[in-house]
Image (tube, rainbow, N blue to C red):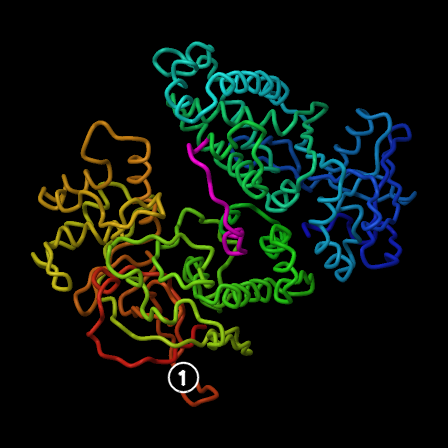
Amino acid sequence: MRDTTFPPGQGAKYQPLKAEGHVRLVQFSRLGSQLHCRLKEVSISEQPEYHALSYVWRWRPQSSDLADPGHDENATRSVFIDGREVQVTANLADFIETITHLWTNVPLFWVDAICINQADDAEKSIQLRMMSNIYENASLIVIWLGKHDATSRATIEKMQEWHDLSLEFCSRYPTWDDMSKASRNWLVGAGVTAQDGSLVDRNAWVDFAQFFQTRQWWHRVWTVQEYCPDVDRLFLCGDTTFTPRCLYEALFLAKLVIDASDSQFLSDAMDVVMRTETFRAEYHRKRPPGELTLYERLHGYEFKRHPLTLEAILITWRSRLASDPRDKVFALLGLLEVPFRQHPLLAINCSLSTVDVFTNVAEYMLEESRSLGFLGAVQPVRSISQTGYPSWVPDWCNTKTDILQLPVVIEYVPGLTPVGRSFISSSDRTCAAYTPWPSEYPFPPGKPLPSIVRAPTGAELHLDGKYHDMIVSLCDAAPNDSLPNISTITRWAEELCTTQDVYPATKEPMLLAVLRTLALDVDNLVSVELVRPPKGLEELSMLPIADAIRGFINGTGSKETYDERGRHTNRQRYLKGRRPAVTQYGYICIVPEHAEKEDCIVAFAGGAVLYVVRQEGWVRGASGLEERYSFVGEAYVHGLMDVDVEQPKSERSRFVLV
């Protein structure tokens, strides 16, 4: 959907499309300095020959530190569409100018800003639903990254060089074991790194990282769907082209460099690009003949692809940007398999509000997964008066993707295995340890789901649950919304351990209970297969608190493996956006950092973890007075997750989330 291209009164004159399944294609040409576009209506079903353009409407640096003070992202230029002069964004005009210079015979193109009547919501809705088919049926997808800057031409030349080096390395060391053993010495021999691990040509790698930081194409949500089709693709930056395979191999060499040298700047910049490449590879599950996939090369093992759920897709690309909030959903629907994207709740309708779109998505996730897993994507707490979103509806405009959902364990039911979450067990006890009502997770077919009521004041989620406890004290949150460091976590442990020596709920030493709580009672947060108590916590609990926390975060030995570093880092990552709290009945727990005293700890039928809710008062409902709650987030409560709860002895209640 993006922003309207043509200013009011200067729009192109469109004739309505003649039939369903029809699109407009555009023929570009130049007449002197004028850029001309001639529209042609075709039927996609007749398989016309055309290229599809993937680009961003307005170019702006992703990092404000790299911005050009003279650059105007809202600048427009004149083009002629069927003889009528109109204004298009400068970035699109730059592409038309470049392609008509580079190619003598420019083929037909599909370009959303020109081929869709942006002033007609009905047409726009229909065409957006067709976008995945439009890109899948193109003969070539051209990815326009914008004009050259001071370093981009040299960076692309370097990528070609690194492509050759990567192919040489992979041909010499074809297995992961060979690669991991030989990479450091090979990088030195190839002149990429020095003996001390430093980069030989650091400036080239800095420019490489900035190439992706400054190009908006890597950061916008629409480009994900446009990049994924199994169609030939070509990158175009200024007048220079390069292939996805060139990028693919340069990324792998960058990964080897990251592992072998002190180059965090490169790791940060590569994350979003590597995510795009690995997602596309796993989306198609294609292996280059005789080679490891990029995912296998990057991670050392084969990824077993599971069906992509909408929840998993939206969470994966939550950090991508969009000018229209609805595009955070609309732009990704084409990644679903056809039967799912045709669900009535997911039909693209440009007349719907953002609140309606996000609420429809939440209702779809509840209906499709038959569980409350989507509640884990809600962050942070909101009120309707502040944003218009119900508190229980995930806000997909929130780009804080570093706040992770709690790991959960479920009881697998044949034919009903839930998808979209990481299922992790911390105990060799029953697999229903995290499940308040095992027989009801997920909701079996035929059993009513929680109801969603579209009330005048906002959508409400009505569901059964049990009140368990209430928060009475909280530790201070990590400063500046940062990852909790050793100092912060040590302070938390010291504060919690001052209350008592033995944790009443589990009869274990208090420090051990605190460590298990901070670890969410999970062994390796990277793995989804390990089923045993957290490793080494009993030994750590025998140490002074400061030493125990240092070992908990950093590991106790000097010979850490990469996986061990990943595990300890993830222990901190799972605490990001959370903090410890103590309840009325003496339980210690991990709750969202925006939780408050007197918030309630509850269990919901169909939920896989415990939840924090906030009382909002009583209102008269269809069945009399009903108490309303706002949803705060997920909670881990040590001692309530693994044992039968006898206290408090409350019956099920009806909860209304607003």
Q: Position of residue 280 (x, y in %)?
A: 58, 40
Please tell me how many numbered marks the rendered image carries: 1
Furthest-bottom residue in this view: 624
| Left or right of 128, for residue 429 | left
Image: 392 above or below 619: above
| Residue 304 inside the magenta-drawn segment | yes
Any part of residue 388 in sight: no
> Which one is in front, 536 or 360?
536
Q: Residue at x 82, y 29 (%)?
A: 100
| Left or right of 363, for residue 411 | left
> Which one is in front, 416 or 401?
416
> Which one is in front, 417 or 603?
417
Q: Position of residue 143 (x, y in %)?
A: 68, 35
Amino acid type, callout 1: Glu
Image: 205 above or below 94: above
The span picked out in magenta is: 298-314
> Which one is in front, 132 or 484?
132
Q: Residue at x 27, y 61 (%)?
A: 430
| Left or right of 110, for residue 324 | left
Furthest-left residue in this view: 501
Q: Position of residue 456 (x, y in %)?
A: 56, 78
Label 1: which residue? Answer: 626
| Left or right of 511, for residue 304 | right
Q: Residue at x 29, y 74 (%)?
A: 467
Determine crowd level at label 1: few under 14, some 14-19, many 20+ residues with C-alpha closer than 10 A.
Answer: some
> The residue tagged with tag 1: helix, strand or loop?
strand
Any part of residue 513 in sight: yes
| Residue 621 inside the magenta-drawn segment | no
Which of the 4 quarters of the picture holds residue 230? top right
Which of the 4 quarters of the picture holds residue 472? bottom left
Q: Quadrant of the C terminus?
A: bottom left
Q: Residue at x 37, y 16 (%)?
A: 197
